């Protein structure tokens, strides 16, 4: 103890040296190593009243949020309102504003209540969308690689659900597939490739409402299937019906793409047979 006492006997001299170093921008660690002050209590006394240099202050990501929370609390906002506005927990809010006076409760105006409800609903929708995307990703990951047989069966079902079918009163054994979903078109073309259908037998045509950007739709579908727009068949224009409340009117509306397979009667008959083979196989499955 005597050694420690003698080491710090010239306290004022040490303080003057420590303050000079502090004002020169040194950190506590750097100051401690210069005059070899290894006692934190002594170092605190030496630096008493001297603020740390700016570079030693650690930035806090929540400083701005905390300041905003205090500002809103002083304006009379409740914890619930602040939570919805800032997206932070009530426990954090309580910690930040607990020294502030509790605001007097007043009845919210209809506009305020509506705004709070809207923000709460928007937050809920964002959470739902995140959950939806997570579920979709997990489900997609379970599919993995498709075998040829799996793709074959998927394609048969896809065609029989969305493709043109022959009717007893109208015998038309042809392969025609129409869809507005680019992903469906991709799967269908991949399926035709699996069946070794000659790409030269494929014909493409756009079907779209007259109020849409027809040229943009033609470019979109031609790019999607990898052909020049000049190779598209004549576009089918659908007349606009004012009484129809259509939802597909934004800039991402490109109508439908029709795919025809030339001389496809034999292929159609096989598709029909494959489909009824699937139906029979499903019916024979044990309970």
Image (cartoon, helix red, strand yellow):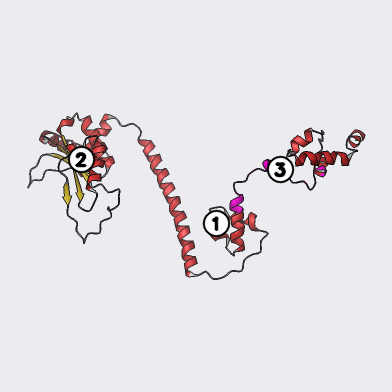
Taking depth in this image into account, of 72 and 166 the one nearest to the observer is 72
88 horizontally vs 269: left or right: right
Percent of width and height locating residue 65:
58, 52
Q: Residues within 10 Å of mark 2 (few under 14, many from 20)?
A: many
Look at the image and tell me in which quarter the N terminus lies. Answer: top right
Which residue bears the numbered disc 3?
A: 53
Front one among 96 and 268: 96
> Which of the two discs, 1 and 3, labels the residue nearer the N terminus?
3
Q: Quadrant of residue 121?
A: bottom left
Label 1 belongs to which residue?
83
Of callouts 2 and 3, the N-terminal one: 3
- Which residue carries the number 2 mark? 159
Residue 72 in percent (x, y) is at 58, 60
Q: Residue at x 25, y 59 (%)?
A: 245
Magenta residues (range): 45-66
Quick check: 7 above or below 171? Answer: above
Q: Quadrant of residue 40?
A: top right
In this rendering, does residue 284 appear at all? no
Residue count near mark 3 (Cα–Cα under 10 Å), binned few <14, some 14–19, many ≥20 = some
Residue displayed at 62% across by 66% down: 103
Q: CA distance from mark 1 to mark 2?
A: 51 Å
Instruction: Name the spot of residue 89 as percent of width and height, x first.
Output: 57, 53
Give the mark nearer the N terminus: 1 vs 2: 1
């Amino acid at each position: 103890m005597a050694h420690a006492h003698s080491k710090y006997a010239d306290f004022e001299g040490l303080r003057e040296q420590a303050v000079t170093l502090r004002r020169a921008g040194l950190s506590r660690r750097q100051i401690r190593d210069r005059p070899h002050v290894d006692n934190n209590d002594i170092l605190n006394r030496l630096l008493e009243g001297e603020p740390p240099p700016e570079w030693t202050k650690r930035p806090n990501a929540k400083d701005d949020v905390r300041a905003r929370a205090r500002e809103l609390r002083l304006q009379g906002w409740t914890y619930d309102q602040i939570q919805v506005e800032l997206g932070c927990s009530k426990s954090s809010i309580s910690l930040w504003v607990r020294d502030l006076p509790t605001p007097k409760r007043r009845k919210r105006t209809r506009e305020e209540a509506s705004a709070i409800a809207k923000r709460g609903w928007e937050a809920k929708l964002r959470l739902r969308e995140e959950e939806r995307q997570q579920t979709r990703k997990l489900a997609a990951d379970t599919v993995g690689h498709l075998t040829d047989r799996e793709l074959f069966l998927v394609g048969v079902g896809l065609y029989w659900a969305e493709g043109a079918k022959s009717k007893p009163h109208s015998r038309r054994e042809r392969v025609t597939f129409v869809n507005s979903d680019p992903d469906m078109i991709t799967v269908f073309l991949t399926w035709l490739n699996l069946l070794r259908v000659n790409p030269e037998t494929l014909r493409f045509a756009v079907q779209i409402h007259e109020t849409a950007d027809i040229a943009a739709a033609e470019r979109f579908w031609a790019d999607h299937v990898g052909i020049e727009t000049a190779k598209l068949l004549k576009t089918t224009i659908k007349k606009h019906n004012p009484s129809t409340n259509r939802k597909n009117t934004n800039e991402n509306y490109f109508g439908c793409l029709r795919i025809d397979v030339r001389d496809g009667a034999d292929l159609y008959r096989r598709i029909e047979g494959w489909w009824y083979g699937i139906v029979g196989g499903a019916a024979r499955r044990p309970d």
